[in-house]
Amino acid sequence: MMRSLLAAIASACLALPAAAQTLTLLRNIDAPHYDPARTSAGATAEIVFIIGDTLVGLDYDLKTVTPLLAKSWTVSPDGKLYTFKLRDDVTFCSGRKMTAADVVFSFKRVLDPEIKSPFVWRMGPVKDIRAPDPHTVEYELEAPFGELLLQLTNFQATVLNPENVAALGKDFGVKGFDGTGPFCFQSWEPRNQTVALRHAAYRWGPPLYKNPGPAKYERVVWRIVPEEAARLAAMASGQIDMTYSMPDQYLPQLAKMPSIEILRPAANLRLFYFGFKASRENVSDPRVRTALSQAIDRRQLVDAIYFGNGEPAATYLHPKTPDFDPATSTHLGTYDPAAAGRLLDEAGWTLSGDGFRYKDGKKLTLLLYGFAGGRSPKMAEAVQGFWRKIGVDLQLQMWDGTIVFSKLAQQDYDLWSIAFPYSSAGDALRLYFHSTNIPTPNRMNWKDPQTDRWLEAGVTALDAKARFDAFAQVQKIVHQNALWVPLVHEGLALVVNKRVKNVRAHHVYTSMIYKALDASP
């Protein structure tokens, strides 16, 4: 069964001539795997959006939900029943026709407790998901979930072939992936490259593209190049078509090259932050967490590490985020090392002659886990220097992108560093701060009934004011408790060789190319 399925997938993809038209992209880190239900990794999402599809798509404005596998839908007056009408011409790369039963399987798999999907909350408070006929999906909720359509554009809601999942077992998303996307998974060499071939039957792209399919390129290759200078050289020499992993310091140089253009998405909703595992002894006191946040000069980080391609972050959400509360306190972003020292003194951590702080004979040493690639090491080293000035010993442990999430799951750290994308206040807050998301992605182990109540009120609100008011309360609570160190609202840039035509920068979750249907040689 396994061999026949793989053979069918191969035949559904275009046979490549000797000089195939290949779209080549650079990435700085690899994914842990390509099973959309089992990870929140952006490196997974980038490729899953290309090799798979969701019921609904997201337009370039990052707000408007469009048809995709579902050609239409209706919502009941009480907001609890969504009825999706599916296209009848969709096939997986194997040639097997997609039906409503595949949608039901895929969604229920995300909800399965054994899968432990970090994005299970994005599916809403599901009562039942059913297929009354091959082209209809009824999605019934226990309570209203105003962001359901938006959340179903994300990669965890990718429709899978149940036969492929069963055949591959634990190797699904590692050795194979039978999707309905514009490209078909061909191979993955961890830490090296991922290859996908054009899905010749594809005709159902979302309406934001002029070309509904098939894709104009015959294959896509994502290459992993951790070295920053090597990425610049590859892009400048024309070896690579595009990247959204270009180091910030090279963007001004690239912008001057006649063969290169830099494209920006409609919104830069992406935060680089440090999160506290608040249940750990040395960071359990909000005064300590606040002090650590106030000891960092964020403008220096933006200028020295981002080369101006970002904004100092004083809040967890960018001010342009839907449902951001302008009244949210910005005290965490205030650079005041003297005040930070006073807070540590109040918390009982006194400065010793060796320049470090101690309490009950124990040194204030913290362990941070982060990504070995990208900006993470530089950011960690910079913060390490700021905290050393106030007597805090920060130890760094950086992990390769293929294993970092498994290491984070072990919970053996005081802090972690990561950049996360989001689309709204509800999207960000519900994901990270609800107690049901412990241990991941609520790695803070934040379990607060009041936070949960306000989050539920915001998620189930049927009008905009009630939603805003609820999420404003959550923003107040989590900032007062200093659960994160907000550092930089990251600038986003898609660097493109001009030989690639008809490109626009998207930014659904972390993917800036989304389906790449209009891109042409």
Image: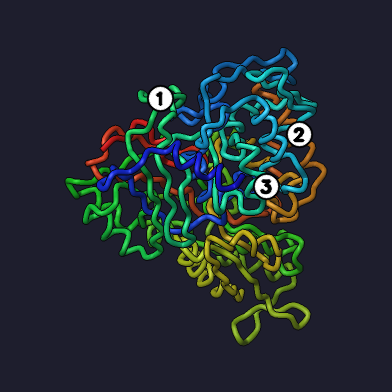
Q: Amino acid at mark 3?
A: Pro
Q: Which residue is mark 3?
A: 118
The residue mark sitting in front, 1 or 2, is 1
Q: Is residue 475 visible?
A: no
| Mark 1 closeness class: few <14, some 14–19, many ≥20 residues within 10 Å | some
Q: Is residue 484 visible?
A: yes
Residue 150, percent from left and from top: 59, 29
Which residue is at 69% across, 34% downward?
105
Q: Which residue is mark 2?
A: 456
Left/right placement of residue 20 relative to residue 144 reads: left
Residue placed most toward the observer, 319 or 126? 126
**Label 2 – label 3 distance at C-alpha:** 18 Å
Furthest-bottom residue in view?
A: 353
Which residue is at 38% across, 61% downward?
225
When the figure is inspected, residue 112 is found, relative to residue 266, above or below; the finding is below
Q: The residue tagged with tag 3: helix, strand or loop?
A: loop
**Label 1 – label 2 distance at C-alpha:** 38 Å
In the picture, the disc for residue 192 is none
Mark 1 / mark 3, whichever is N-terminal: 3
Q: In what quadrant of the picture does the C terminus appear?
A: top left
When the figure is inspected, residue 415 is found, relative to residue 26, above or below; the finding is below
